[in-house]
Image (spheres, grey):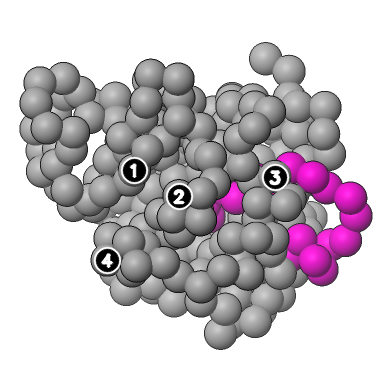
Amino acid sequence: MKPLPQKTLIVIPARMAATRLPGKPLADIAGKPMIVRMVELADRTGLGPVVVAAGDPEIVAAVEAAGGRAVLTDPALPSGTDRVFAALKAVGGDHDVIVNLQGDMPTIAPSLIVKATMVLKDGADIATLVSPSDDPDDRANPNVVKAIVAEDGRALYFTRAPAPHGDGPIQRHVGIYVYTRDALEAFVAAPPSPLELREKLEQLRALEMGMTIRAGVVEEFPKGVDSPPDLELARAYFAELGE
């Protein structure tokens, strides 16, 4: 699978503050901080340069010590997307495809990141990924975000509620976004939307603005590290790889 011909920048937002796992960007996974693991797998995509949008100097130090590039962003920025845009401005250049890769998904396969960029078709403002599940626990879990996706791949809505109604799998949202530069600039310039505030889901702002989000379907569901048990699962994953 070949990446898009546009100039792509991968930005990984990360900050030390976290309710359930404070300091998680620096959490050790098989001898390396988690944020360094994220930079390494992003590099393996071959899509373009990788930069960490760091909310804290400790993260910058860890990334630079490993040979990566990081930008210290204003810790008062309200969201990861705002940090992504701040890093884009700091890096400069004429990148027209920007990947927002979460800093707490160390088990995501590089091929999934590449696939997300391929979903960004003409006429789409944002691309993302979804993964089907028939698990009733996933359907009921408000921490598993469900995407409502039309047959042509357009995302119609995202919700924490059990949806859609009726038989069949749900589509779990995978937390990766690929923006056109224009879409990212417009998104961060707009205020939070009513549905975004209600569901606590940033992507709803884009839908309320009339943007087109396309979702590619993948079988894998790379779970983020949000708690100590998640961290142990990530460590076990790398232990199985022999690292």
Q: Nearer the viewer, residue 133 or 209?
A: 209
Identify the disc placed on residue 198: 4
Disc number placed over residue 207 in the picture, else none? 2
Amino acid at dot 4? Arg
59 vs 207, left or right, is right
Point 28% across, 60% down: residue: 199
**Label 1 residue SS:** strand
- Tell me if residue 237 can be seen: no
Distance from Cα at disc 2 to Cα at disc 4? 14 Å
Q: Look at the image and say whether residue 93 sits in the magenta stretch.
A: yes
At label 3, counting other C-alpha atoms closer than 10 Å, the crowd grade (few under 14, some 14-19, many 20 or more) is: some
Q: For mark 3, what is the residue?
A: 180
Q: Is residue 48 above or below residue 112?
A: below
For the residue labelled by badge 3, is the local secondary structure a helix, a strand or a loop?
strand
| In contact (CB < 8 Å): disc 2 and disc 1 | yes
- Tell me which amino acid carries mark 1: Tyr
- Please say if the residues under marks 1 and 3 sit with CB atoms less than 8 Å apart: no
The answer to which of marks 2 and 3 sits earlier in the sequence is 3
In the image, residue 40 lies in the stretch drawn in magenta? no
Q: Secondary structure at mark 4?
A: helix
Q: Which of the two labelled residues, at mark 3 and mark 4, occupies the earlier sequence position?
A: 3
Amino acid beneath label 3: Thr
Question: Which residue is pictured at 45% across the width and 70% down the height?
Answer: 192
Magenta residues span: 87-103
Q: Amino acid at mark 2?
A: Leu
Residue 105: where, in percent of width, then height? 46, 46
Q: Which mark is residue 157?
A: 1
Q: CA distance from mark 2 to mark 3?
A: 15 Å
Mark 1–mark 3 Cα distance, whole angstroms, equals 20 Å
Which mark is first along the chain, 4 or 2? Answer: 4
